[in-house]
């Protein structure tokens, strides 16, 4: 009896879920970053109109840069997780390449790969 190799659907579903989670986290961090940039822009306008001091703005600059660096790092980490999950899913899928079988009067044949012909290179004669 011939058996067809079945996909590990549980592993594939887990990998797909991990990919989706990583993608959602990238999106969430980008939204958080946009909010932070909007907030800092408001602080700059307040400074420009004389509502806050330069010292207060300098403090805000440091906090904003630290937060931006943290968000960028998390985004890169989640992008790496998404890439890893995508590669894993691709590997699971490519393992499902169809194996050639044929039905004959004597039964089912195939399942193995034919041996490739080796190319024999001939040595050139020296004159």
Image (cartoon, rainbow, N blue to C red):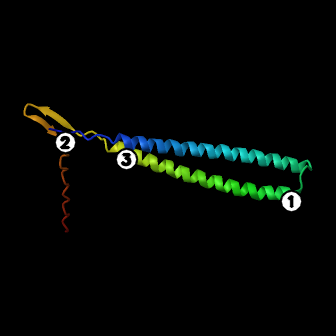
* Residue located 27% across and 39% down the image: 98
- For the residues labelled 1 and 2, say whether their Cβ atoms are less than 8 Å apart: no
Q: Quick one: SS at disc 2?
A: loop
Which numbered mark, 1 or 3, is in the foreground of this view? 1
Give coordinates of residue 93: x percent, y percent: 36, 42
Task: Give the left or right position of residue 24, taking residue 50 as reference.
Answer: left
Residue under pointer 3: 91
How far apart are the two marked residues, 2 and 3, measured between alpha carbons?
20 Å
Residue 117: assigned label: none
Task: Give the left or right position of residue 115, taking residue 18 as reference.
Answer: left
Residue under pointer 2: 111
Q: Residue furthest top?
A: 105
Q: Residue 115, relative to residue 20: is it above or below?
A: below
Using the rendered view, name the quadrant where residue 104 is placed: top left
* Residue located 72% across and 44% down the image: 35
- For the residues labelled 1 and 3, say whether their Cβ atoms are less than 8 Å apart: no
How far apart are the two marked residues, 1 and 3, measured between alpha carbons?
54 Å
Residue placed most toward the observer, 40 or 13: 13
Residue placed most toward the observer, 121 or 28: 28
Dot 2 alpha-carbon crowd within 10 angstroms: few under 14, some 14 to 19, many 20 or more:
some
Closer to the chain start, of discs 2 and 3, is: 3
Q: Residue furthest right?
A: 50
Q: Quadrant of the N terminus?
A: top left
Which numbered mark, 1 or 2, is in the foreground of this view? 1
How far apart are the two marked residues, 1 and 2, measured between alpha carbons?
75 Å
Task: Give the left or right position of residue 100, taking residue 20 as reference.
Answer: left
Residue under pointer 1: 55
Give coordinates of residue 63: x percent, y percent: 75, 57
* Residue located 45% across and 46% down the image: 86
Dot 3 alpha-carbon crowd within 10 angstroms: few under 14, some 14 to 19, many 20 or more:
few
Closer to the chain start, of discs 1 and 3, is: 1
């Amino acid at each position: 009896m011939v058996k067809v190799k079945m996909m590990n659907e549980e592993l594939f579903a887990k990998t797909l879920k991990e990919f989706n989670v990583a993608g959602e986290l990238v999106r969430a961090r980008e939204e958080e970053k946009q909010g932070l940039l909007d907030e800092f822009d408001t602080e700059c306008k307040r400074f420009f109109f004389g509502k806050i001091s330069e010292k207060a703005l300098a403090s805000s600059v440091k906090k904003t840069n630290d937060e931006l660096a943290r968000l960028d790092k998390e985004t890169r980490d989640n992008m790496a997780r998404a890439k890893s999950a995508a590669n894993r899913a691709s590997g699971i899928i490519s393992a499902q390449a169809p194996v050639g079988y044929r039905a004959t009067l004597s039964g089912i044949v195939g399942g193995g790969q034919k041996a490739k012909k080796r190319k024999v290179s001939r040595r050139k004669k020296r004159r």
